Image (cartoon, rainbow, N blue to C red):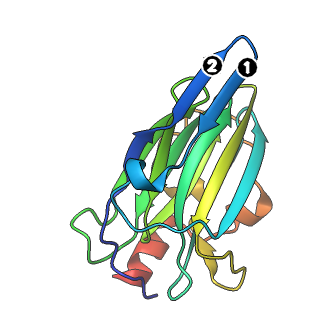
Amino acid sequence: MKYSKNTHDIEVFKSIYLTDNRGYLLKPFMKEVKIKFDFTVDEVFLSSSKKDVIRGMHLQKNPNELKKIITCIKGEVLDVCVNVDKNSKNFGDIKSFLLSEENNNSIYVPNGYAHGFKVLSKEATLLYLQDGNYSPNDEIGINPLTLGFDWGIKKPVISKRDLNLTNYIEFIESIK
């Protein structure tokens, strides 16, 4: 498989969050101030999941790779990213980030990373901003239970589709 070289690493940044007696306003993306990389919003998705759900690890292959900005707008998740860019000094690294409606963190996930998460709260809703368009024919991934990552869940809820993804070692070996 061929991947474009990612020119940036994952970045965590704070969203603007304002609150008063009426409720709140969340501004998870502000290109002029927030980020130091090229990003165009082509698609927006919301994902809602229940406690102990694991989703991932997904990405798209070249030439239809996706960059993502992910914000948890309800609940709490542990967001997990795996570097699959064979040209990167961090090839194979697994990073995790706590995203919640309380910490107002967002993450930028560049090309060359598989992405997934586990839900820590009773329910969680994630907002995905994508640079690029979803292409089912180009989507690939890694079975999240084969990463060697401690998800900390005794009985995870995972789709059959995600369980049937390539295991981590085979995936990494296929791009070396």
Is residue 57 visible in this depiction of the protein? no
Pointer 2: what residue?
Answer: 19
Q: Which of these two is toward me, 12 or 24?
A: 24
Residue 85: percent from the left, percent from the top? 35, 73
Is residue 131 visible in this depiction of the protein? yes
Q: Which residue is at 58% across, 30% downward?
A: 100
Pointer 1: what residue?
Answer: 23
| Helix, strand or loop status at disc 2 | strand
Label 2 crowding class (10 Å Cα cut-off): few <14, some 14-19, many 20+?
few
| Helix, strand or loop status at disc 1 | strand
Q: Determine contact: label 1, label 2, CB under 8 Å.
A: yes
Task: Answer above or below: position of 170 versus 73.
Answer: below
In screen coordinates, is 114 left or right of 93?
A: right
Q: Which residue is at 72% across, 40% downward?
A: 125
In screen coordinates, is 47 left or right of 90?
A: right
Label 1 vs label 2: CA separation?
6 Å
Label 1 crowding class (10 Å Cα cut-off): few <14, some 14-19, many 20+?
few
In screen coordinates, is 87 left or right of 121?
A: left
The part of the image, by quadrant, that contains residue 138 is bottom right
Q: Which residue is at 40% across, 68% downward?
A: 38
Q: Which of these two is toward me, 144 or 44?
A: 44
The part of the image, by quadrant, that contains residue 131 is bottom right
Q: Which residue is at 50% across, 86% downward?
A: 62
Looking at the picture, which amino acid does disc 1 mark? Gly
Task: Answer above or below: position of 9 versus 17.
Answer: below
Residue 140: percent from the left, percent from the top? 60, 75
Residue 67: percent from the left, percent from the top? 50, 67
Task: Answer above or below: position of 154 versus 63.
Answer: above
Hey, which residue is sitting farthest top in the picture? 21
